[in-house]
């Protein structure tokens, strides 16, 4: 009689274990059960926004849910990051962040969240190198001529950027230091408005992400003198790199990544990453991003680990430089 009782006990125990595990398995399999929101800290049409909208289209098919883009502007993207840092860590509120609000802001503002510990990285997405462009009528046809012209017109030229502490602001300040030039750094509410004023001849130059100026460069409305990268931009193969143009090593790139709030479960991070990788692997995606001056990171870098590593290295590099320059957020 003992053996049957033992078998019955083991059978019941196994059944109980399976029942207790069932809700956890069902919960993991159920994600996502409702629409997902990707927060963008800049206005529609900005570099982050373009990357987020193209990404969201591809993610829908894999996740089986609508992916909504929510633009939360202000303070160089720090308001948006704060919203996501405080969100429930369930995978339904994410953020496409960039150098501006996930690196620069940490040295510019007293934030109510920690950029290094209050978010979970999901994937590296794309990057847009900085273009050095001028108004069409400026008497300089290459980077060397621009530097010569700036030196002969100290404190006369104007450089538009997408706000205090943005990558364009930092690049402009460091360009002056590297070249011994002096010009006014003029803040705008985004890169696109600065480029619009460049087209109109209201300012002399911009050093912004390719996403902001590419359309006008291709249209011949402004002149692009150099790409601040190691290699030429595929969308502008005729424009030299800064190495070729005479300012070697002056590399700057606006990169984009996808984050979730800290505490988001591993299985949810994994599902979102799979959706991102599939979206970026769509054959049409490279060409669509190239149209706005962005290039996709290689598949082996589209991981939480690669985003975390790049994020950490950029903070270690830039925070001391920004603080030493005395640049403060407004």
Image (spheres, rainbow, N blue to C red):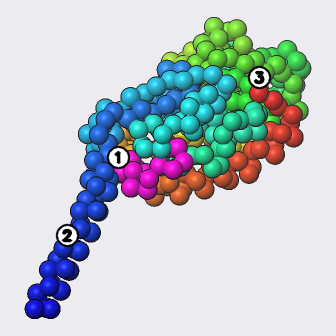
The mark that comes first in sequence, 3 or 2, is: 2
Verify whether residue 272 appears in magenta. yes
C-alpha gap between disc 2 and disc 1: 34 Å
Asked if residue 305 is positioned above or below residue 105 in the image, the reply reads below
* Secondary element at image label 2: helix
Quadrant containing the C terminus in the rendered view: top right
- Which of the numbered marks, if any, corresponds to residue 275? 1
Name the residue beneath numbered marker 2: 15
Q: Is residue 313 above or below residue 90?
A: below
Outermost residue to the front? 1
The residue shown at (54%, 56%) is 306
Image quadrant in which you'd find residue 1: bottom left
Q: In the drawing, what numbered circle is on residue 330?
A: 3
Query: Gap between marks 3 and 1, in whole Å?
Result: 37 Å
Residue 236 forms part of the magenta stretch? no
Secondary structure, mark 1, is helix
């Amino acid at each position: 009689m003992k053996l049957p009782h033992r078998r019955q006990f083991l059978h019941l125990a196994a059944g109980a274990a399976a029942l207790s595990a069932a809700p956890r398995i069902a919960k993991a399999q159920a994600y996502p059960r409702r629409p997902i929101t990707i927060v963008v800290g800049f206005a529609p049409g900005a570099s982050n926004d373009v990357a987020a909208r193209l990404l969201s289209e591809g993610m829908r098919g894999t996740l089986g849910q609508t992916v909504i883009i929510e633009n939360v502007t202000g303070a160089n993207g720090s308001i948006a990051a704060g919203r996501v840092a405080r969100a429930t860590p369930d995978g339904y509120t994410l953020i496409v962040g960039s150098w501006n609000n996930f690196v620069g802001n940490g040295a510019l503002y007293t934030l109510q969240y920690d950029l290094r510990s209050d978010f979970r990285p999901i994937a590296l997405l794309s990057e847009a190198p900085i273009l050095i462009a001028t108004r069409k009528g400026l008497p300089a046809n290459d980077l060397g001529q621009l530097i010569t012209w700036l030196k002969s017109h100290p404190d006369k030229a104007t450089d538009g950027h997408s706000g205090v502490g943005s990558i364009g602001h930092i690049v402009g300040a460091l360009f002056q230091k590297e070249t011994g030039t002096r010009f006014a750094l003029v803040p705008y509410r985004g890169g696109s408005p600065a480029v619009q004023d460049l087209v109109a001849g209201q300012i002399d130059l911009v050093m912004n992400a390719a996403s902001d100026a590419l359309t006008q460069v291709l249209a011949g409305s402004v002149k692009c003198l150099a790409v601040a990268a190691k290699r030429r931009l595929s969308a502008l193969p005729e424009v030299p790199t800064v190495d070729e143009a005479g300012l070697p090593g002056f590399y700057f790139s606006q990169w984009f990544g996808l984050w979730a709030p800290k505490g988001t479960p591993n299985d949810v991070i994994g599902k979102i990453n799979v959706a991102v990788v599939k979206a970026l692997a769509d054959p049409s995606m490279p060409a669509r991003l190239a149209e706005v001056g962005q290039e996709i990171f290689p598949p082996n870098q589209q991981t939480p680990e690669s985003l975390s590593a790049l994020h950490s290295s950029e903070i270690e590099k830039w925070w001391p430089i920004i603080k030493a320059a005395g640049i403060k957020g407004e």
